[in-house]
Amino acid sequence: MSNLVHIYGNINADGTIHSSSGDFKVVNEGGGFYKVTFDDSFKTIPTAVAAQNFREWDDFRYESGSPLDNTVLVALDKSKFKVLTGGNNNRASRNFTFIAIGMR
């Protein structure tokens, strides 16, 4: 029988993990691209959602964010996904957060 699994993470702009469920690895590929690889593959392609955090994780005073500061889910399969972060039509390394949900 399969189990529903949630994998989540808050990733710093340099590719280090700020906080997480602990069952994945991150590679900062440069130019705003990041590859996240799950320790164990899902049974089918999971649902994944990512969002950018700009500027700092706990800076509630920052009020100049732009909807052009964004994260794009570039590719997704059973074992990994790739995201692109940036703003104002430019690729840039930025903090981002994600959740992936699927069956194992």
Image: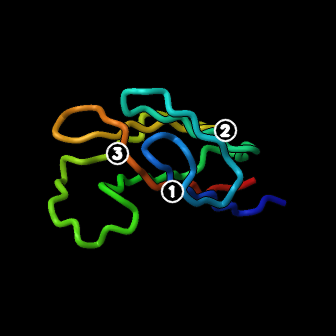
Task: Quarter of the image for the N terminus: give it.
Answer: bottom right
SS of the residue under disc 3: strand
Mark 2: which amino acid?
Ser
Mark identifier at residue 60? none
User: Which residue is pictured at 67% across the width and 46% down the height?
Assistant: 24
Question: Which residue is the extreme one toward the right?
Answer: 1
In the rendered view, tell whether residue 103 sits above or below residue 80.
Answer: below
Q: Residues within 10 Å of mark 1 (few under 14, many from 20)?
A: many
SS of the residue under disc 2: loop
Mark 3: which amino acid?
Thr
C-alpha span from label 3 to label 1: 13 Å
Question: Which residue is the extreme one toward the top?
Answer: 30
User: Which residue is pictured at 19% across the width and 58% down the height?
Assistant: 65
Question: Which residue is the extreme one toward the bottom?
Answer: 60
C-alpha span from label 3 to label 2: 20 Å
Residue assigned mark 2? 79
Q: Earlier in the sequence, mark 2 or mark 1?
A: 1
Mark identifier at residue 10? 1
Q: Nearer the viewer, mark 2 or mark 1?
A: 1
User: Which residue is pictured at 76% across the width and 62% down the height?
Assistant: 3
The spot of residue 91 in percent (x, y) is 29, 32
User: Which residue is pictured at 76% across the width and 45% down the height?
Assistant: 40
In the rendered view, tell whether residue 19 sits above or below residue 12.
Answer: below
Residue assigned mark 3? 71
